[in-house]
């Protein structure tokens, strides 16, 4: 019997886990499944800006060879300018790495840091790749709470209480997946202070930094510190609706001299995989410098703005469901009243929903949330589909086992 490595024992990604397999089975049987499991804009009719697509095509012949392992200089210069304009101090183009999506850079940045037994503070709920990357690297993901009562803001006191002499880094996801929270300057400043005090690297995942609603303001964590090492991470998947290109980047800023050896390790890992997909690297400069992003879509009259409003209205009208209104990204993380419904296992809840209504959402535990009382909805489908899907959810809960 050939077995997986020990490193994979504690690693999962429920967005494409066992429930995903069940949804594929249903589709094979000829059923239409509404897949609200993954934040992939293209299948819902969103398109990357025309100028970006055209630029990739025009540069295809130039993109046949490998690039530098950190990525094309022109793309990294564009990333540098983006963060310089946002107020991040002391940026150098050499501190920017491009990756096959942010996912690859999350894996590399964690693998380059973590030794067996090292701890990394990861939010609960989280985007589960972060927990998986830490566990896969032999480390321990220690979850700090985000507080639903205060709009899913990180609970900094909880974070502080979980720091040990093994803690190496803290992960901040802002705007957040799955909650849609956008963090205040005060909260970010407290986190930065903690990182400075305990010499923790800050991994700031800001892949939704332009998907903001109702005048929400995004503050890049790196603008708040030159004393901690901050790794800002983003890409084209969400802001430019181009998830399939696999174009991501990370920027190291702050007290870089303290992390020279770690940065050298990142360099080694980047060179081991030679370079990221070169045609997609060509998209970065034109996207960041040349074309509008999602700003029209997030307006109340824009497609994402309308879908968010309708999804929130219909979801929160279901008896037993409450939800914090998201201020960024395109997810909602509603709470199910477990005093009203008989729910002890949230995976079973989403399997029951899939079976009864052919709607696929992901259980809260898939985001390392430790109570069986949440699930995540992706509100990328158009308003007709959202309306129909929320009716199905309403129907499902009105017939669900009562506590
Ligand atoms: N970080 C967060 C918070 C995400 O939600 C995602 C994708 O859903 C990623 C990282 C990975 O994005 P990419 O498509 O760039 O690999």
Image: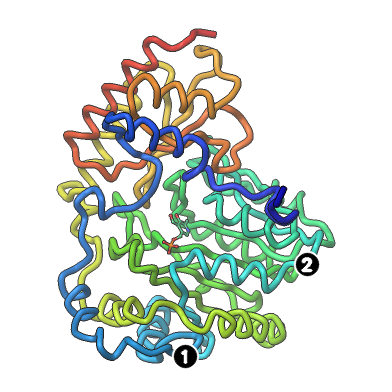
Element carrying mark 1: loop
In the image, is the residue at mark 2 within 8 Å of ligand 1 by its beta carbon? Answer: no
Q: Quick one: label 2, few (<14), some, or many (20+) residues within 10 Å?
A: some
**Label 2: which residue?**
115
Residue drawn at 38 percent across, 44 percent down: 331
Residue drawn at 39 percent across, 62 percent down: 209
User: Does residue 1 appear left or right of residue 367 in this picture?
Assistant: right
Q: Quick one: label 1, few (<14), some, or many (20+) residues within 10 Å?
A: some
User: Does residue 71 appear left or right of residue 338 in this picture?
Assistant: left
Sequence-first tag of 2 and 1: 1
Return the residue found at the far right: 165
* Above-or-below relation of 177 to 335: below
- The Cα–Cα distance between marks 2 and 1, rounded to whole angstroms, is 28 Å
Residue 139 image point, x, y percent: 74, 59
Residue drawn at 51 percent across, 71 percent down: 232
* Above-or-below relation of 30 to 234: above
Element carrying mark 2: loop
**Label 1: which residue?**
68
User: Does residue 114 appear left or right of residue 184 in this picture?
Assistant: right
**Of residues 278 and 292, the one drawn nearer to the viewer in this rendering:** 278
Residue 29 shows which numbered tag? none
User: Does residue 204 appear left or right of residue 286 in this picture?
Assistant: right
In which quadrant of the rendered image does the C terminus lie?
top right
**Of residues 14 and 368, the one drawn nearer to the viewer in this rendering:** 14
**Of residues 340 and 129, the one drawn nearer to the viewer in this rendering:** 129
Residue drawn at 20 percent across, 81 percent down: 55
Which quarter of the figure has residue 243? bottom left
**Of residues 395 and 69, the one drawn nearer to the viewer in this rendering:** 69
Residue 264 image point, x, y percent: 66, 86
- Are the residues tagged 2 and 1 within 8 Å (C-beta)? no
Residue 167 image point, x, y percent: 77, 61
């Amino acid at each position: 019997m050939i077995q997986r490595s020990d490193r994979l024992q504690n690693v999962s990604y429920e967005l494409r886990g066992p429930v995903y397999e069940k949804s594929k089975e249903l589709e094979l049987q000829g059923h239409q499944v509404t897949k609200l499991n993954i934040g992939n804009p293209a299948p819902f009719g969103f398109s990357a800006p025309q100028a970006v697509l055209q630029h990739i095509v025009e540069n295809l012949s130039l993109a046949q060879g490998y690039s530098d392992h950190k990525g094309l200089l022109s793309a990294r210069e564009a990333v540098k300018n983006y963060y310089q304009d946002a107020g991040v101090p002391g940026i150098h183009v050499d501190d920017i790495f491009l990756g096959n999506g942010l996912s690859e850079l999350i894996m590399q940045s964690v693998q380059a840091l973590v030794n067996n037994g090292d701890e990394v503070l990861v939010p609960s709920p989280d985007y589960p790749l972060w927990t998986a990357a830490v566990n896969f690297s032999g480390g321990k993901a220690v979850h700090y709470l985000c507080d639903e009562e205060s709009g899913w803001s990180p609970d900094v006191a909880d974070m502080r209480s979980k720091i040990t002499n093994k803690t190496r880094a803290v992960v901040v996801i802002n705007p957040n997946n799955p909650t849609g929270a956008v963090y205040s300057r005060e909260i970010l400043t407290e986190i930065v202070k903690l990182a400075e005090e305990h010499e923790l690297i800050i991994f700031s995942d800001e892949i939704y930094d332009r998907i903001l609603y109702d005048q929400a303001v995004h503050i890049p964590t790196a603008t708040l510190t030159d004393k901690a090492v901050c790794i800002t991470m983003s890409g084209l998947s969400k802001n430019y609706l181009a998830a399939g290109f696999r174009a991501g980047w990370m920027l190291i800023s702050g007290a870089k001299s303290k992390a020279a050896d770690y940065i050298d390790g990142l360099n080694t890992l980047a060179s081991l995989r030679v370079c990221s997909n070169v045609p997609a690297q060509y998209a970065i400069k034109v996207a960041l410098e040349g074309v509008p992003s999602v700003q029209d879509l997030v307006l109340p009259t824009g497609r994402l703005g309308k879908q968010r409003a309708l999804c929130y209205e219909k979801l929160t009208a279901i008896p037993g469901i409450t939800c914090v209104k998201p201020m960024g990204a395109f997810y909602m993380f509603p709470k199910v009243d477990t005093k009203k419904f008989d729910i002890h296992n949230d995976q079973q809840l989403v399997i029951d929903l899939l079976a009864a209504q052919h709607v696929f959402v992901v259980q809260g535990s898939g985001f390392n949330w430790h109570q069986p009382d949440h699930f995540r909805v992706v509100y990328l489908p158009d308003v007709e589909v959202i309306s129909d899907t929320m009716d199905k959810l309403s129907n499902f809960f009105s017939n669900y086992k009562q506590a």
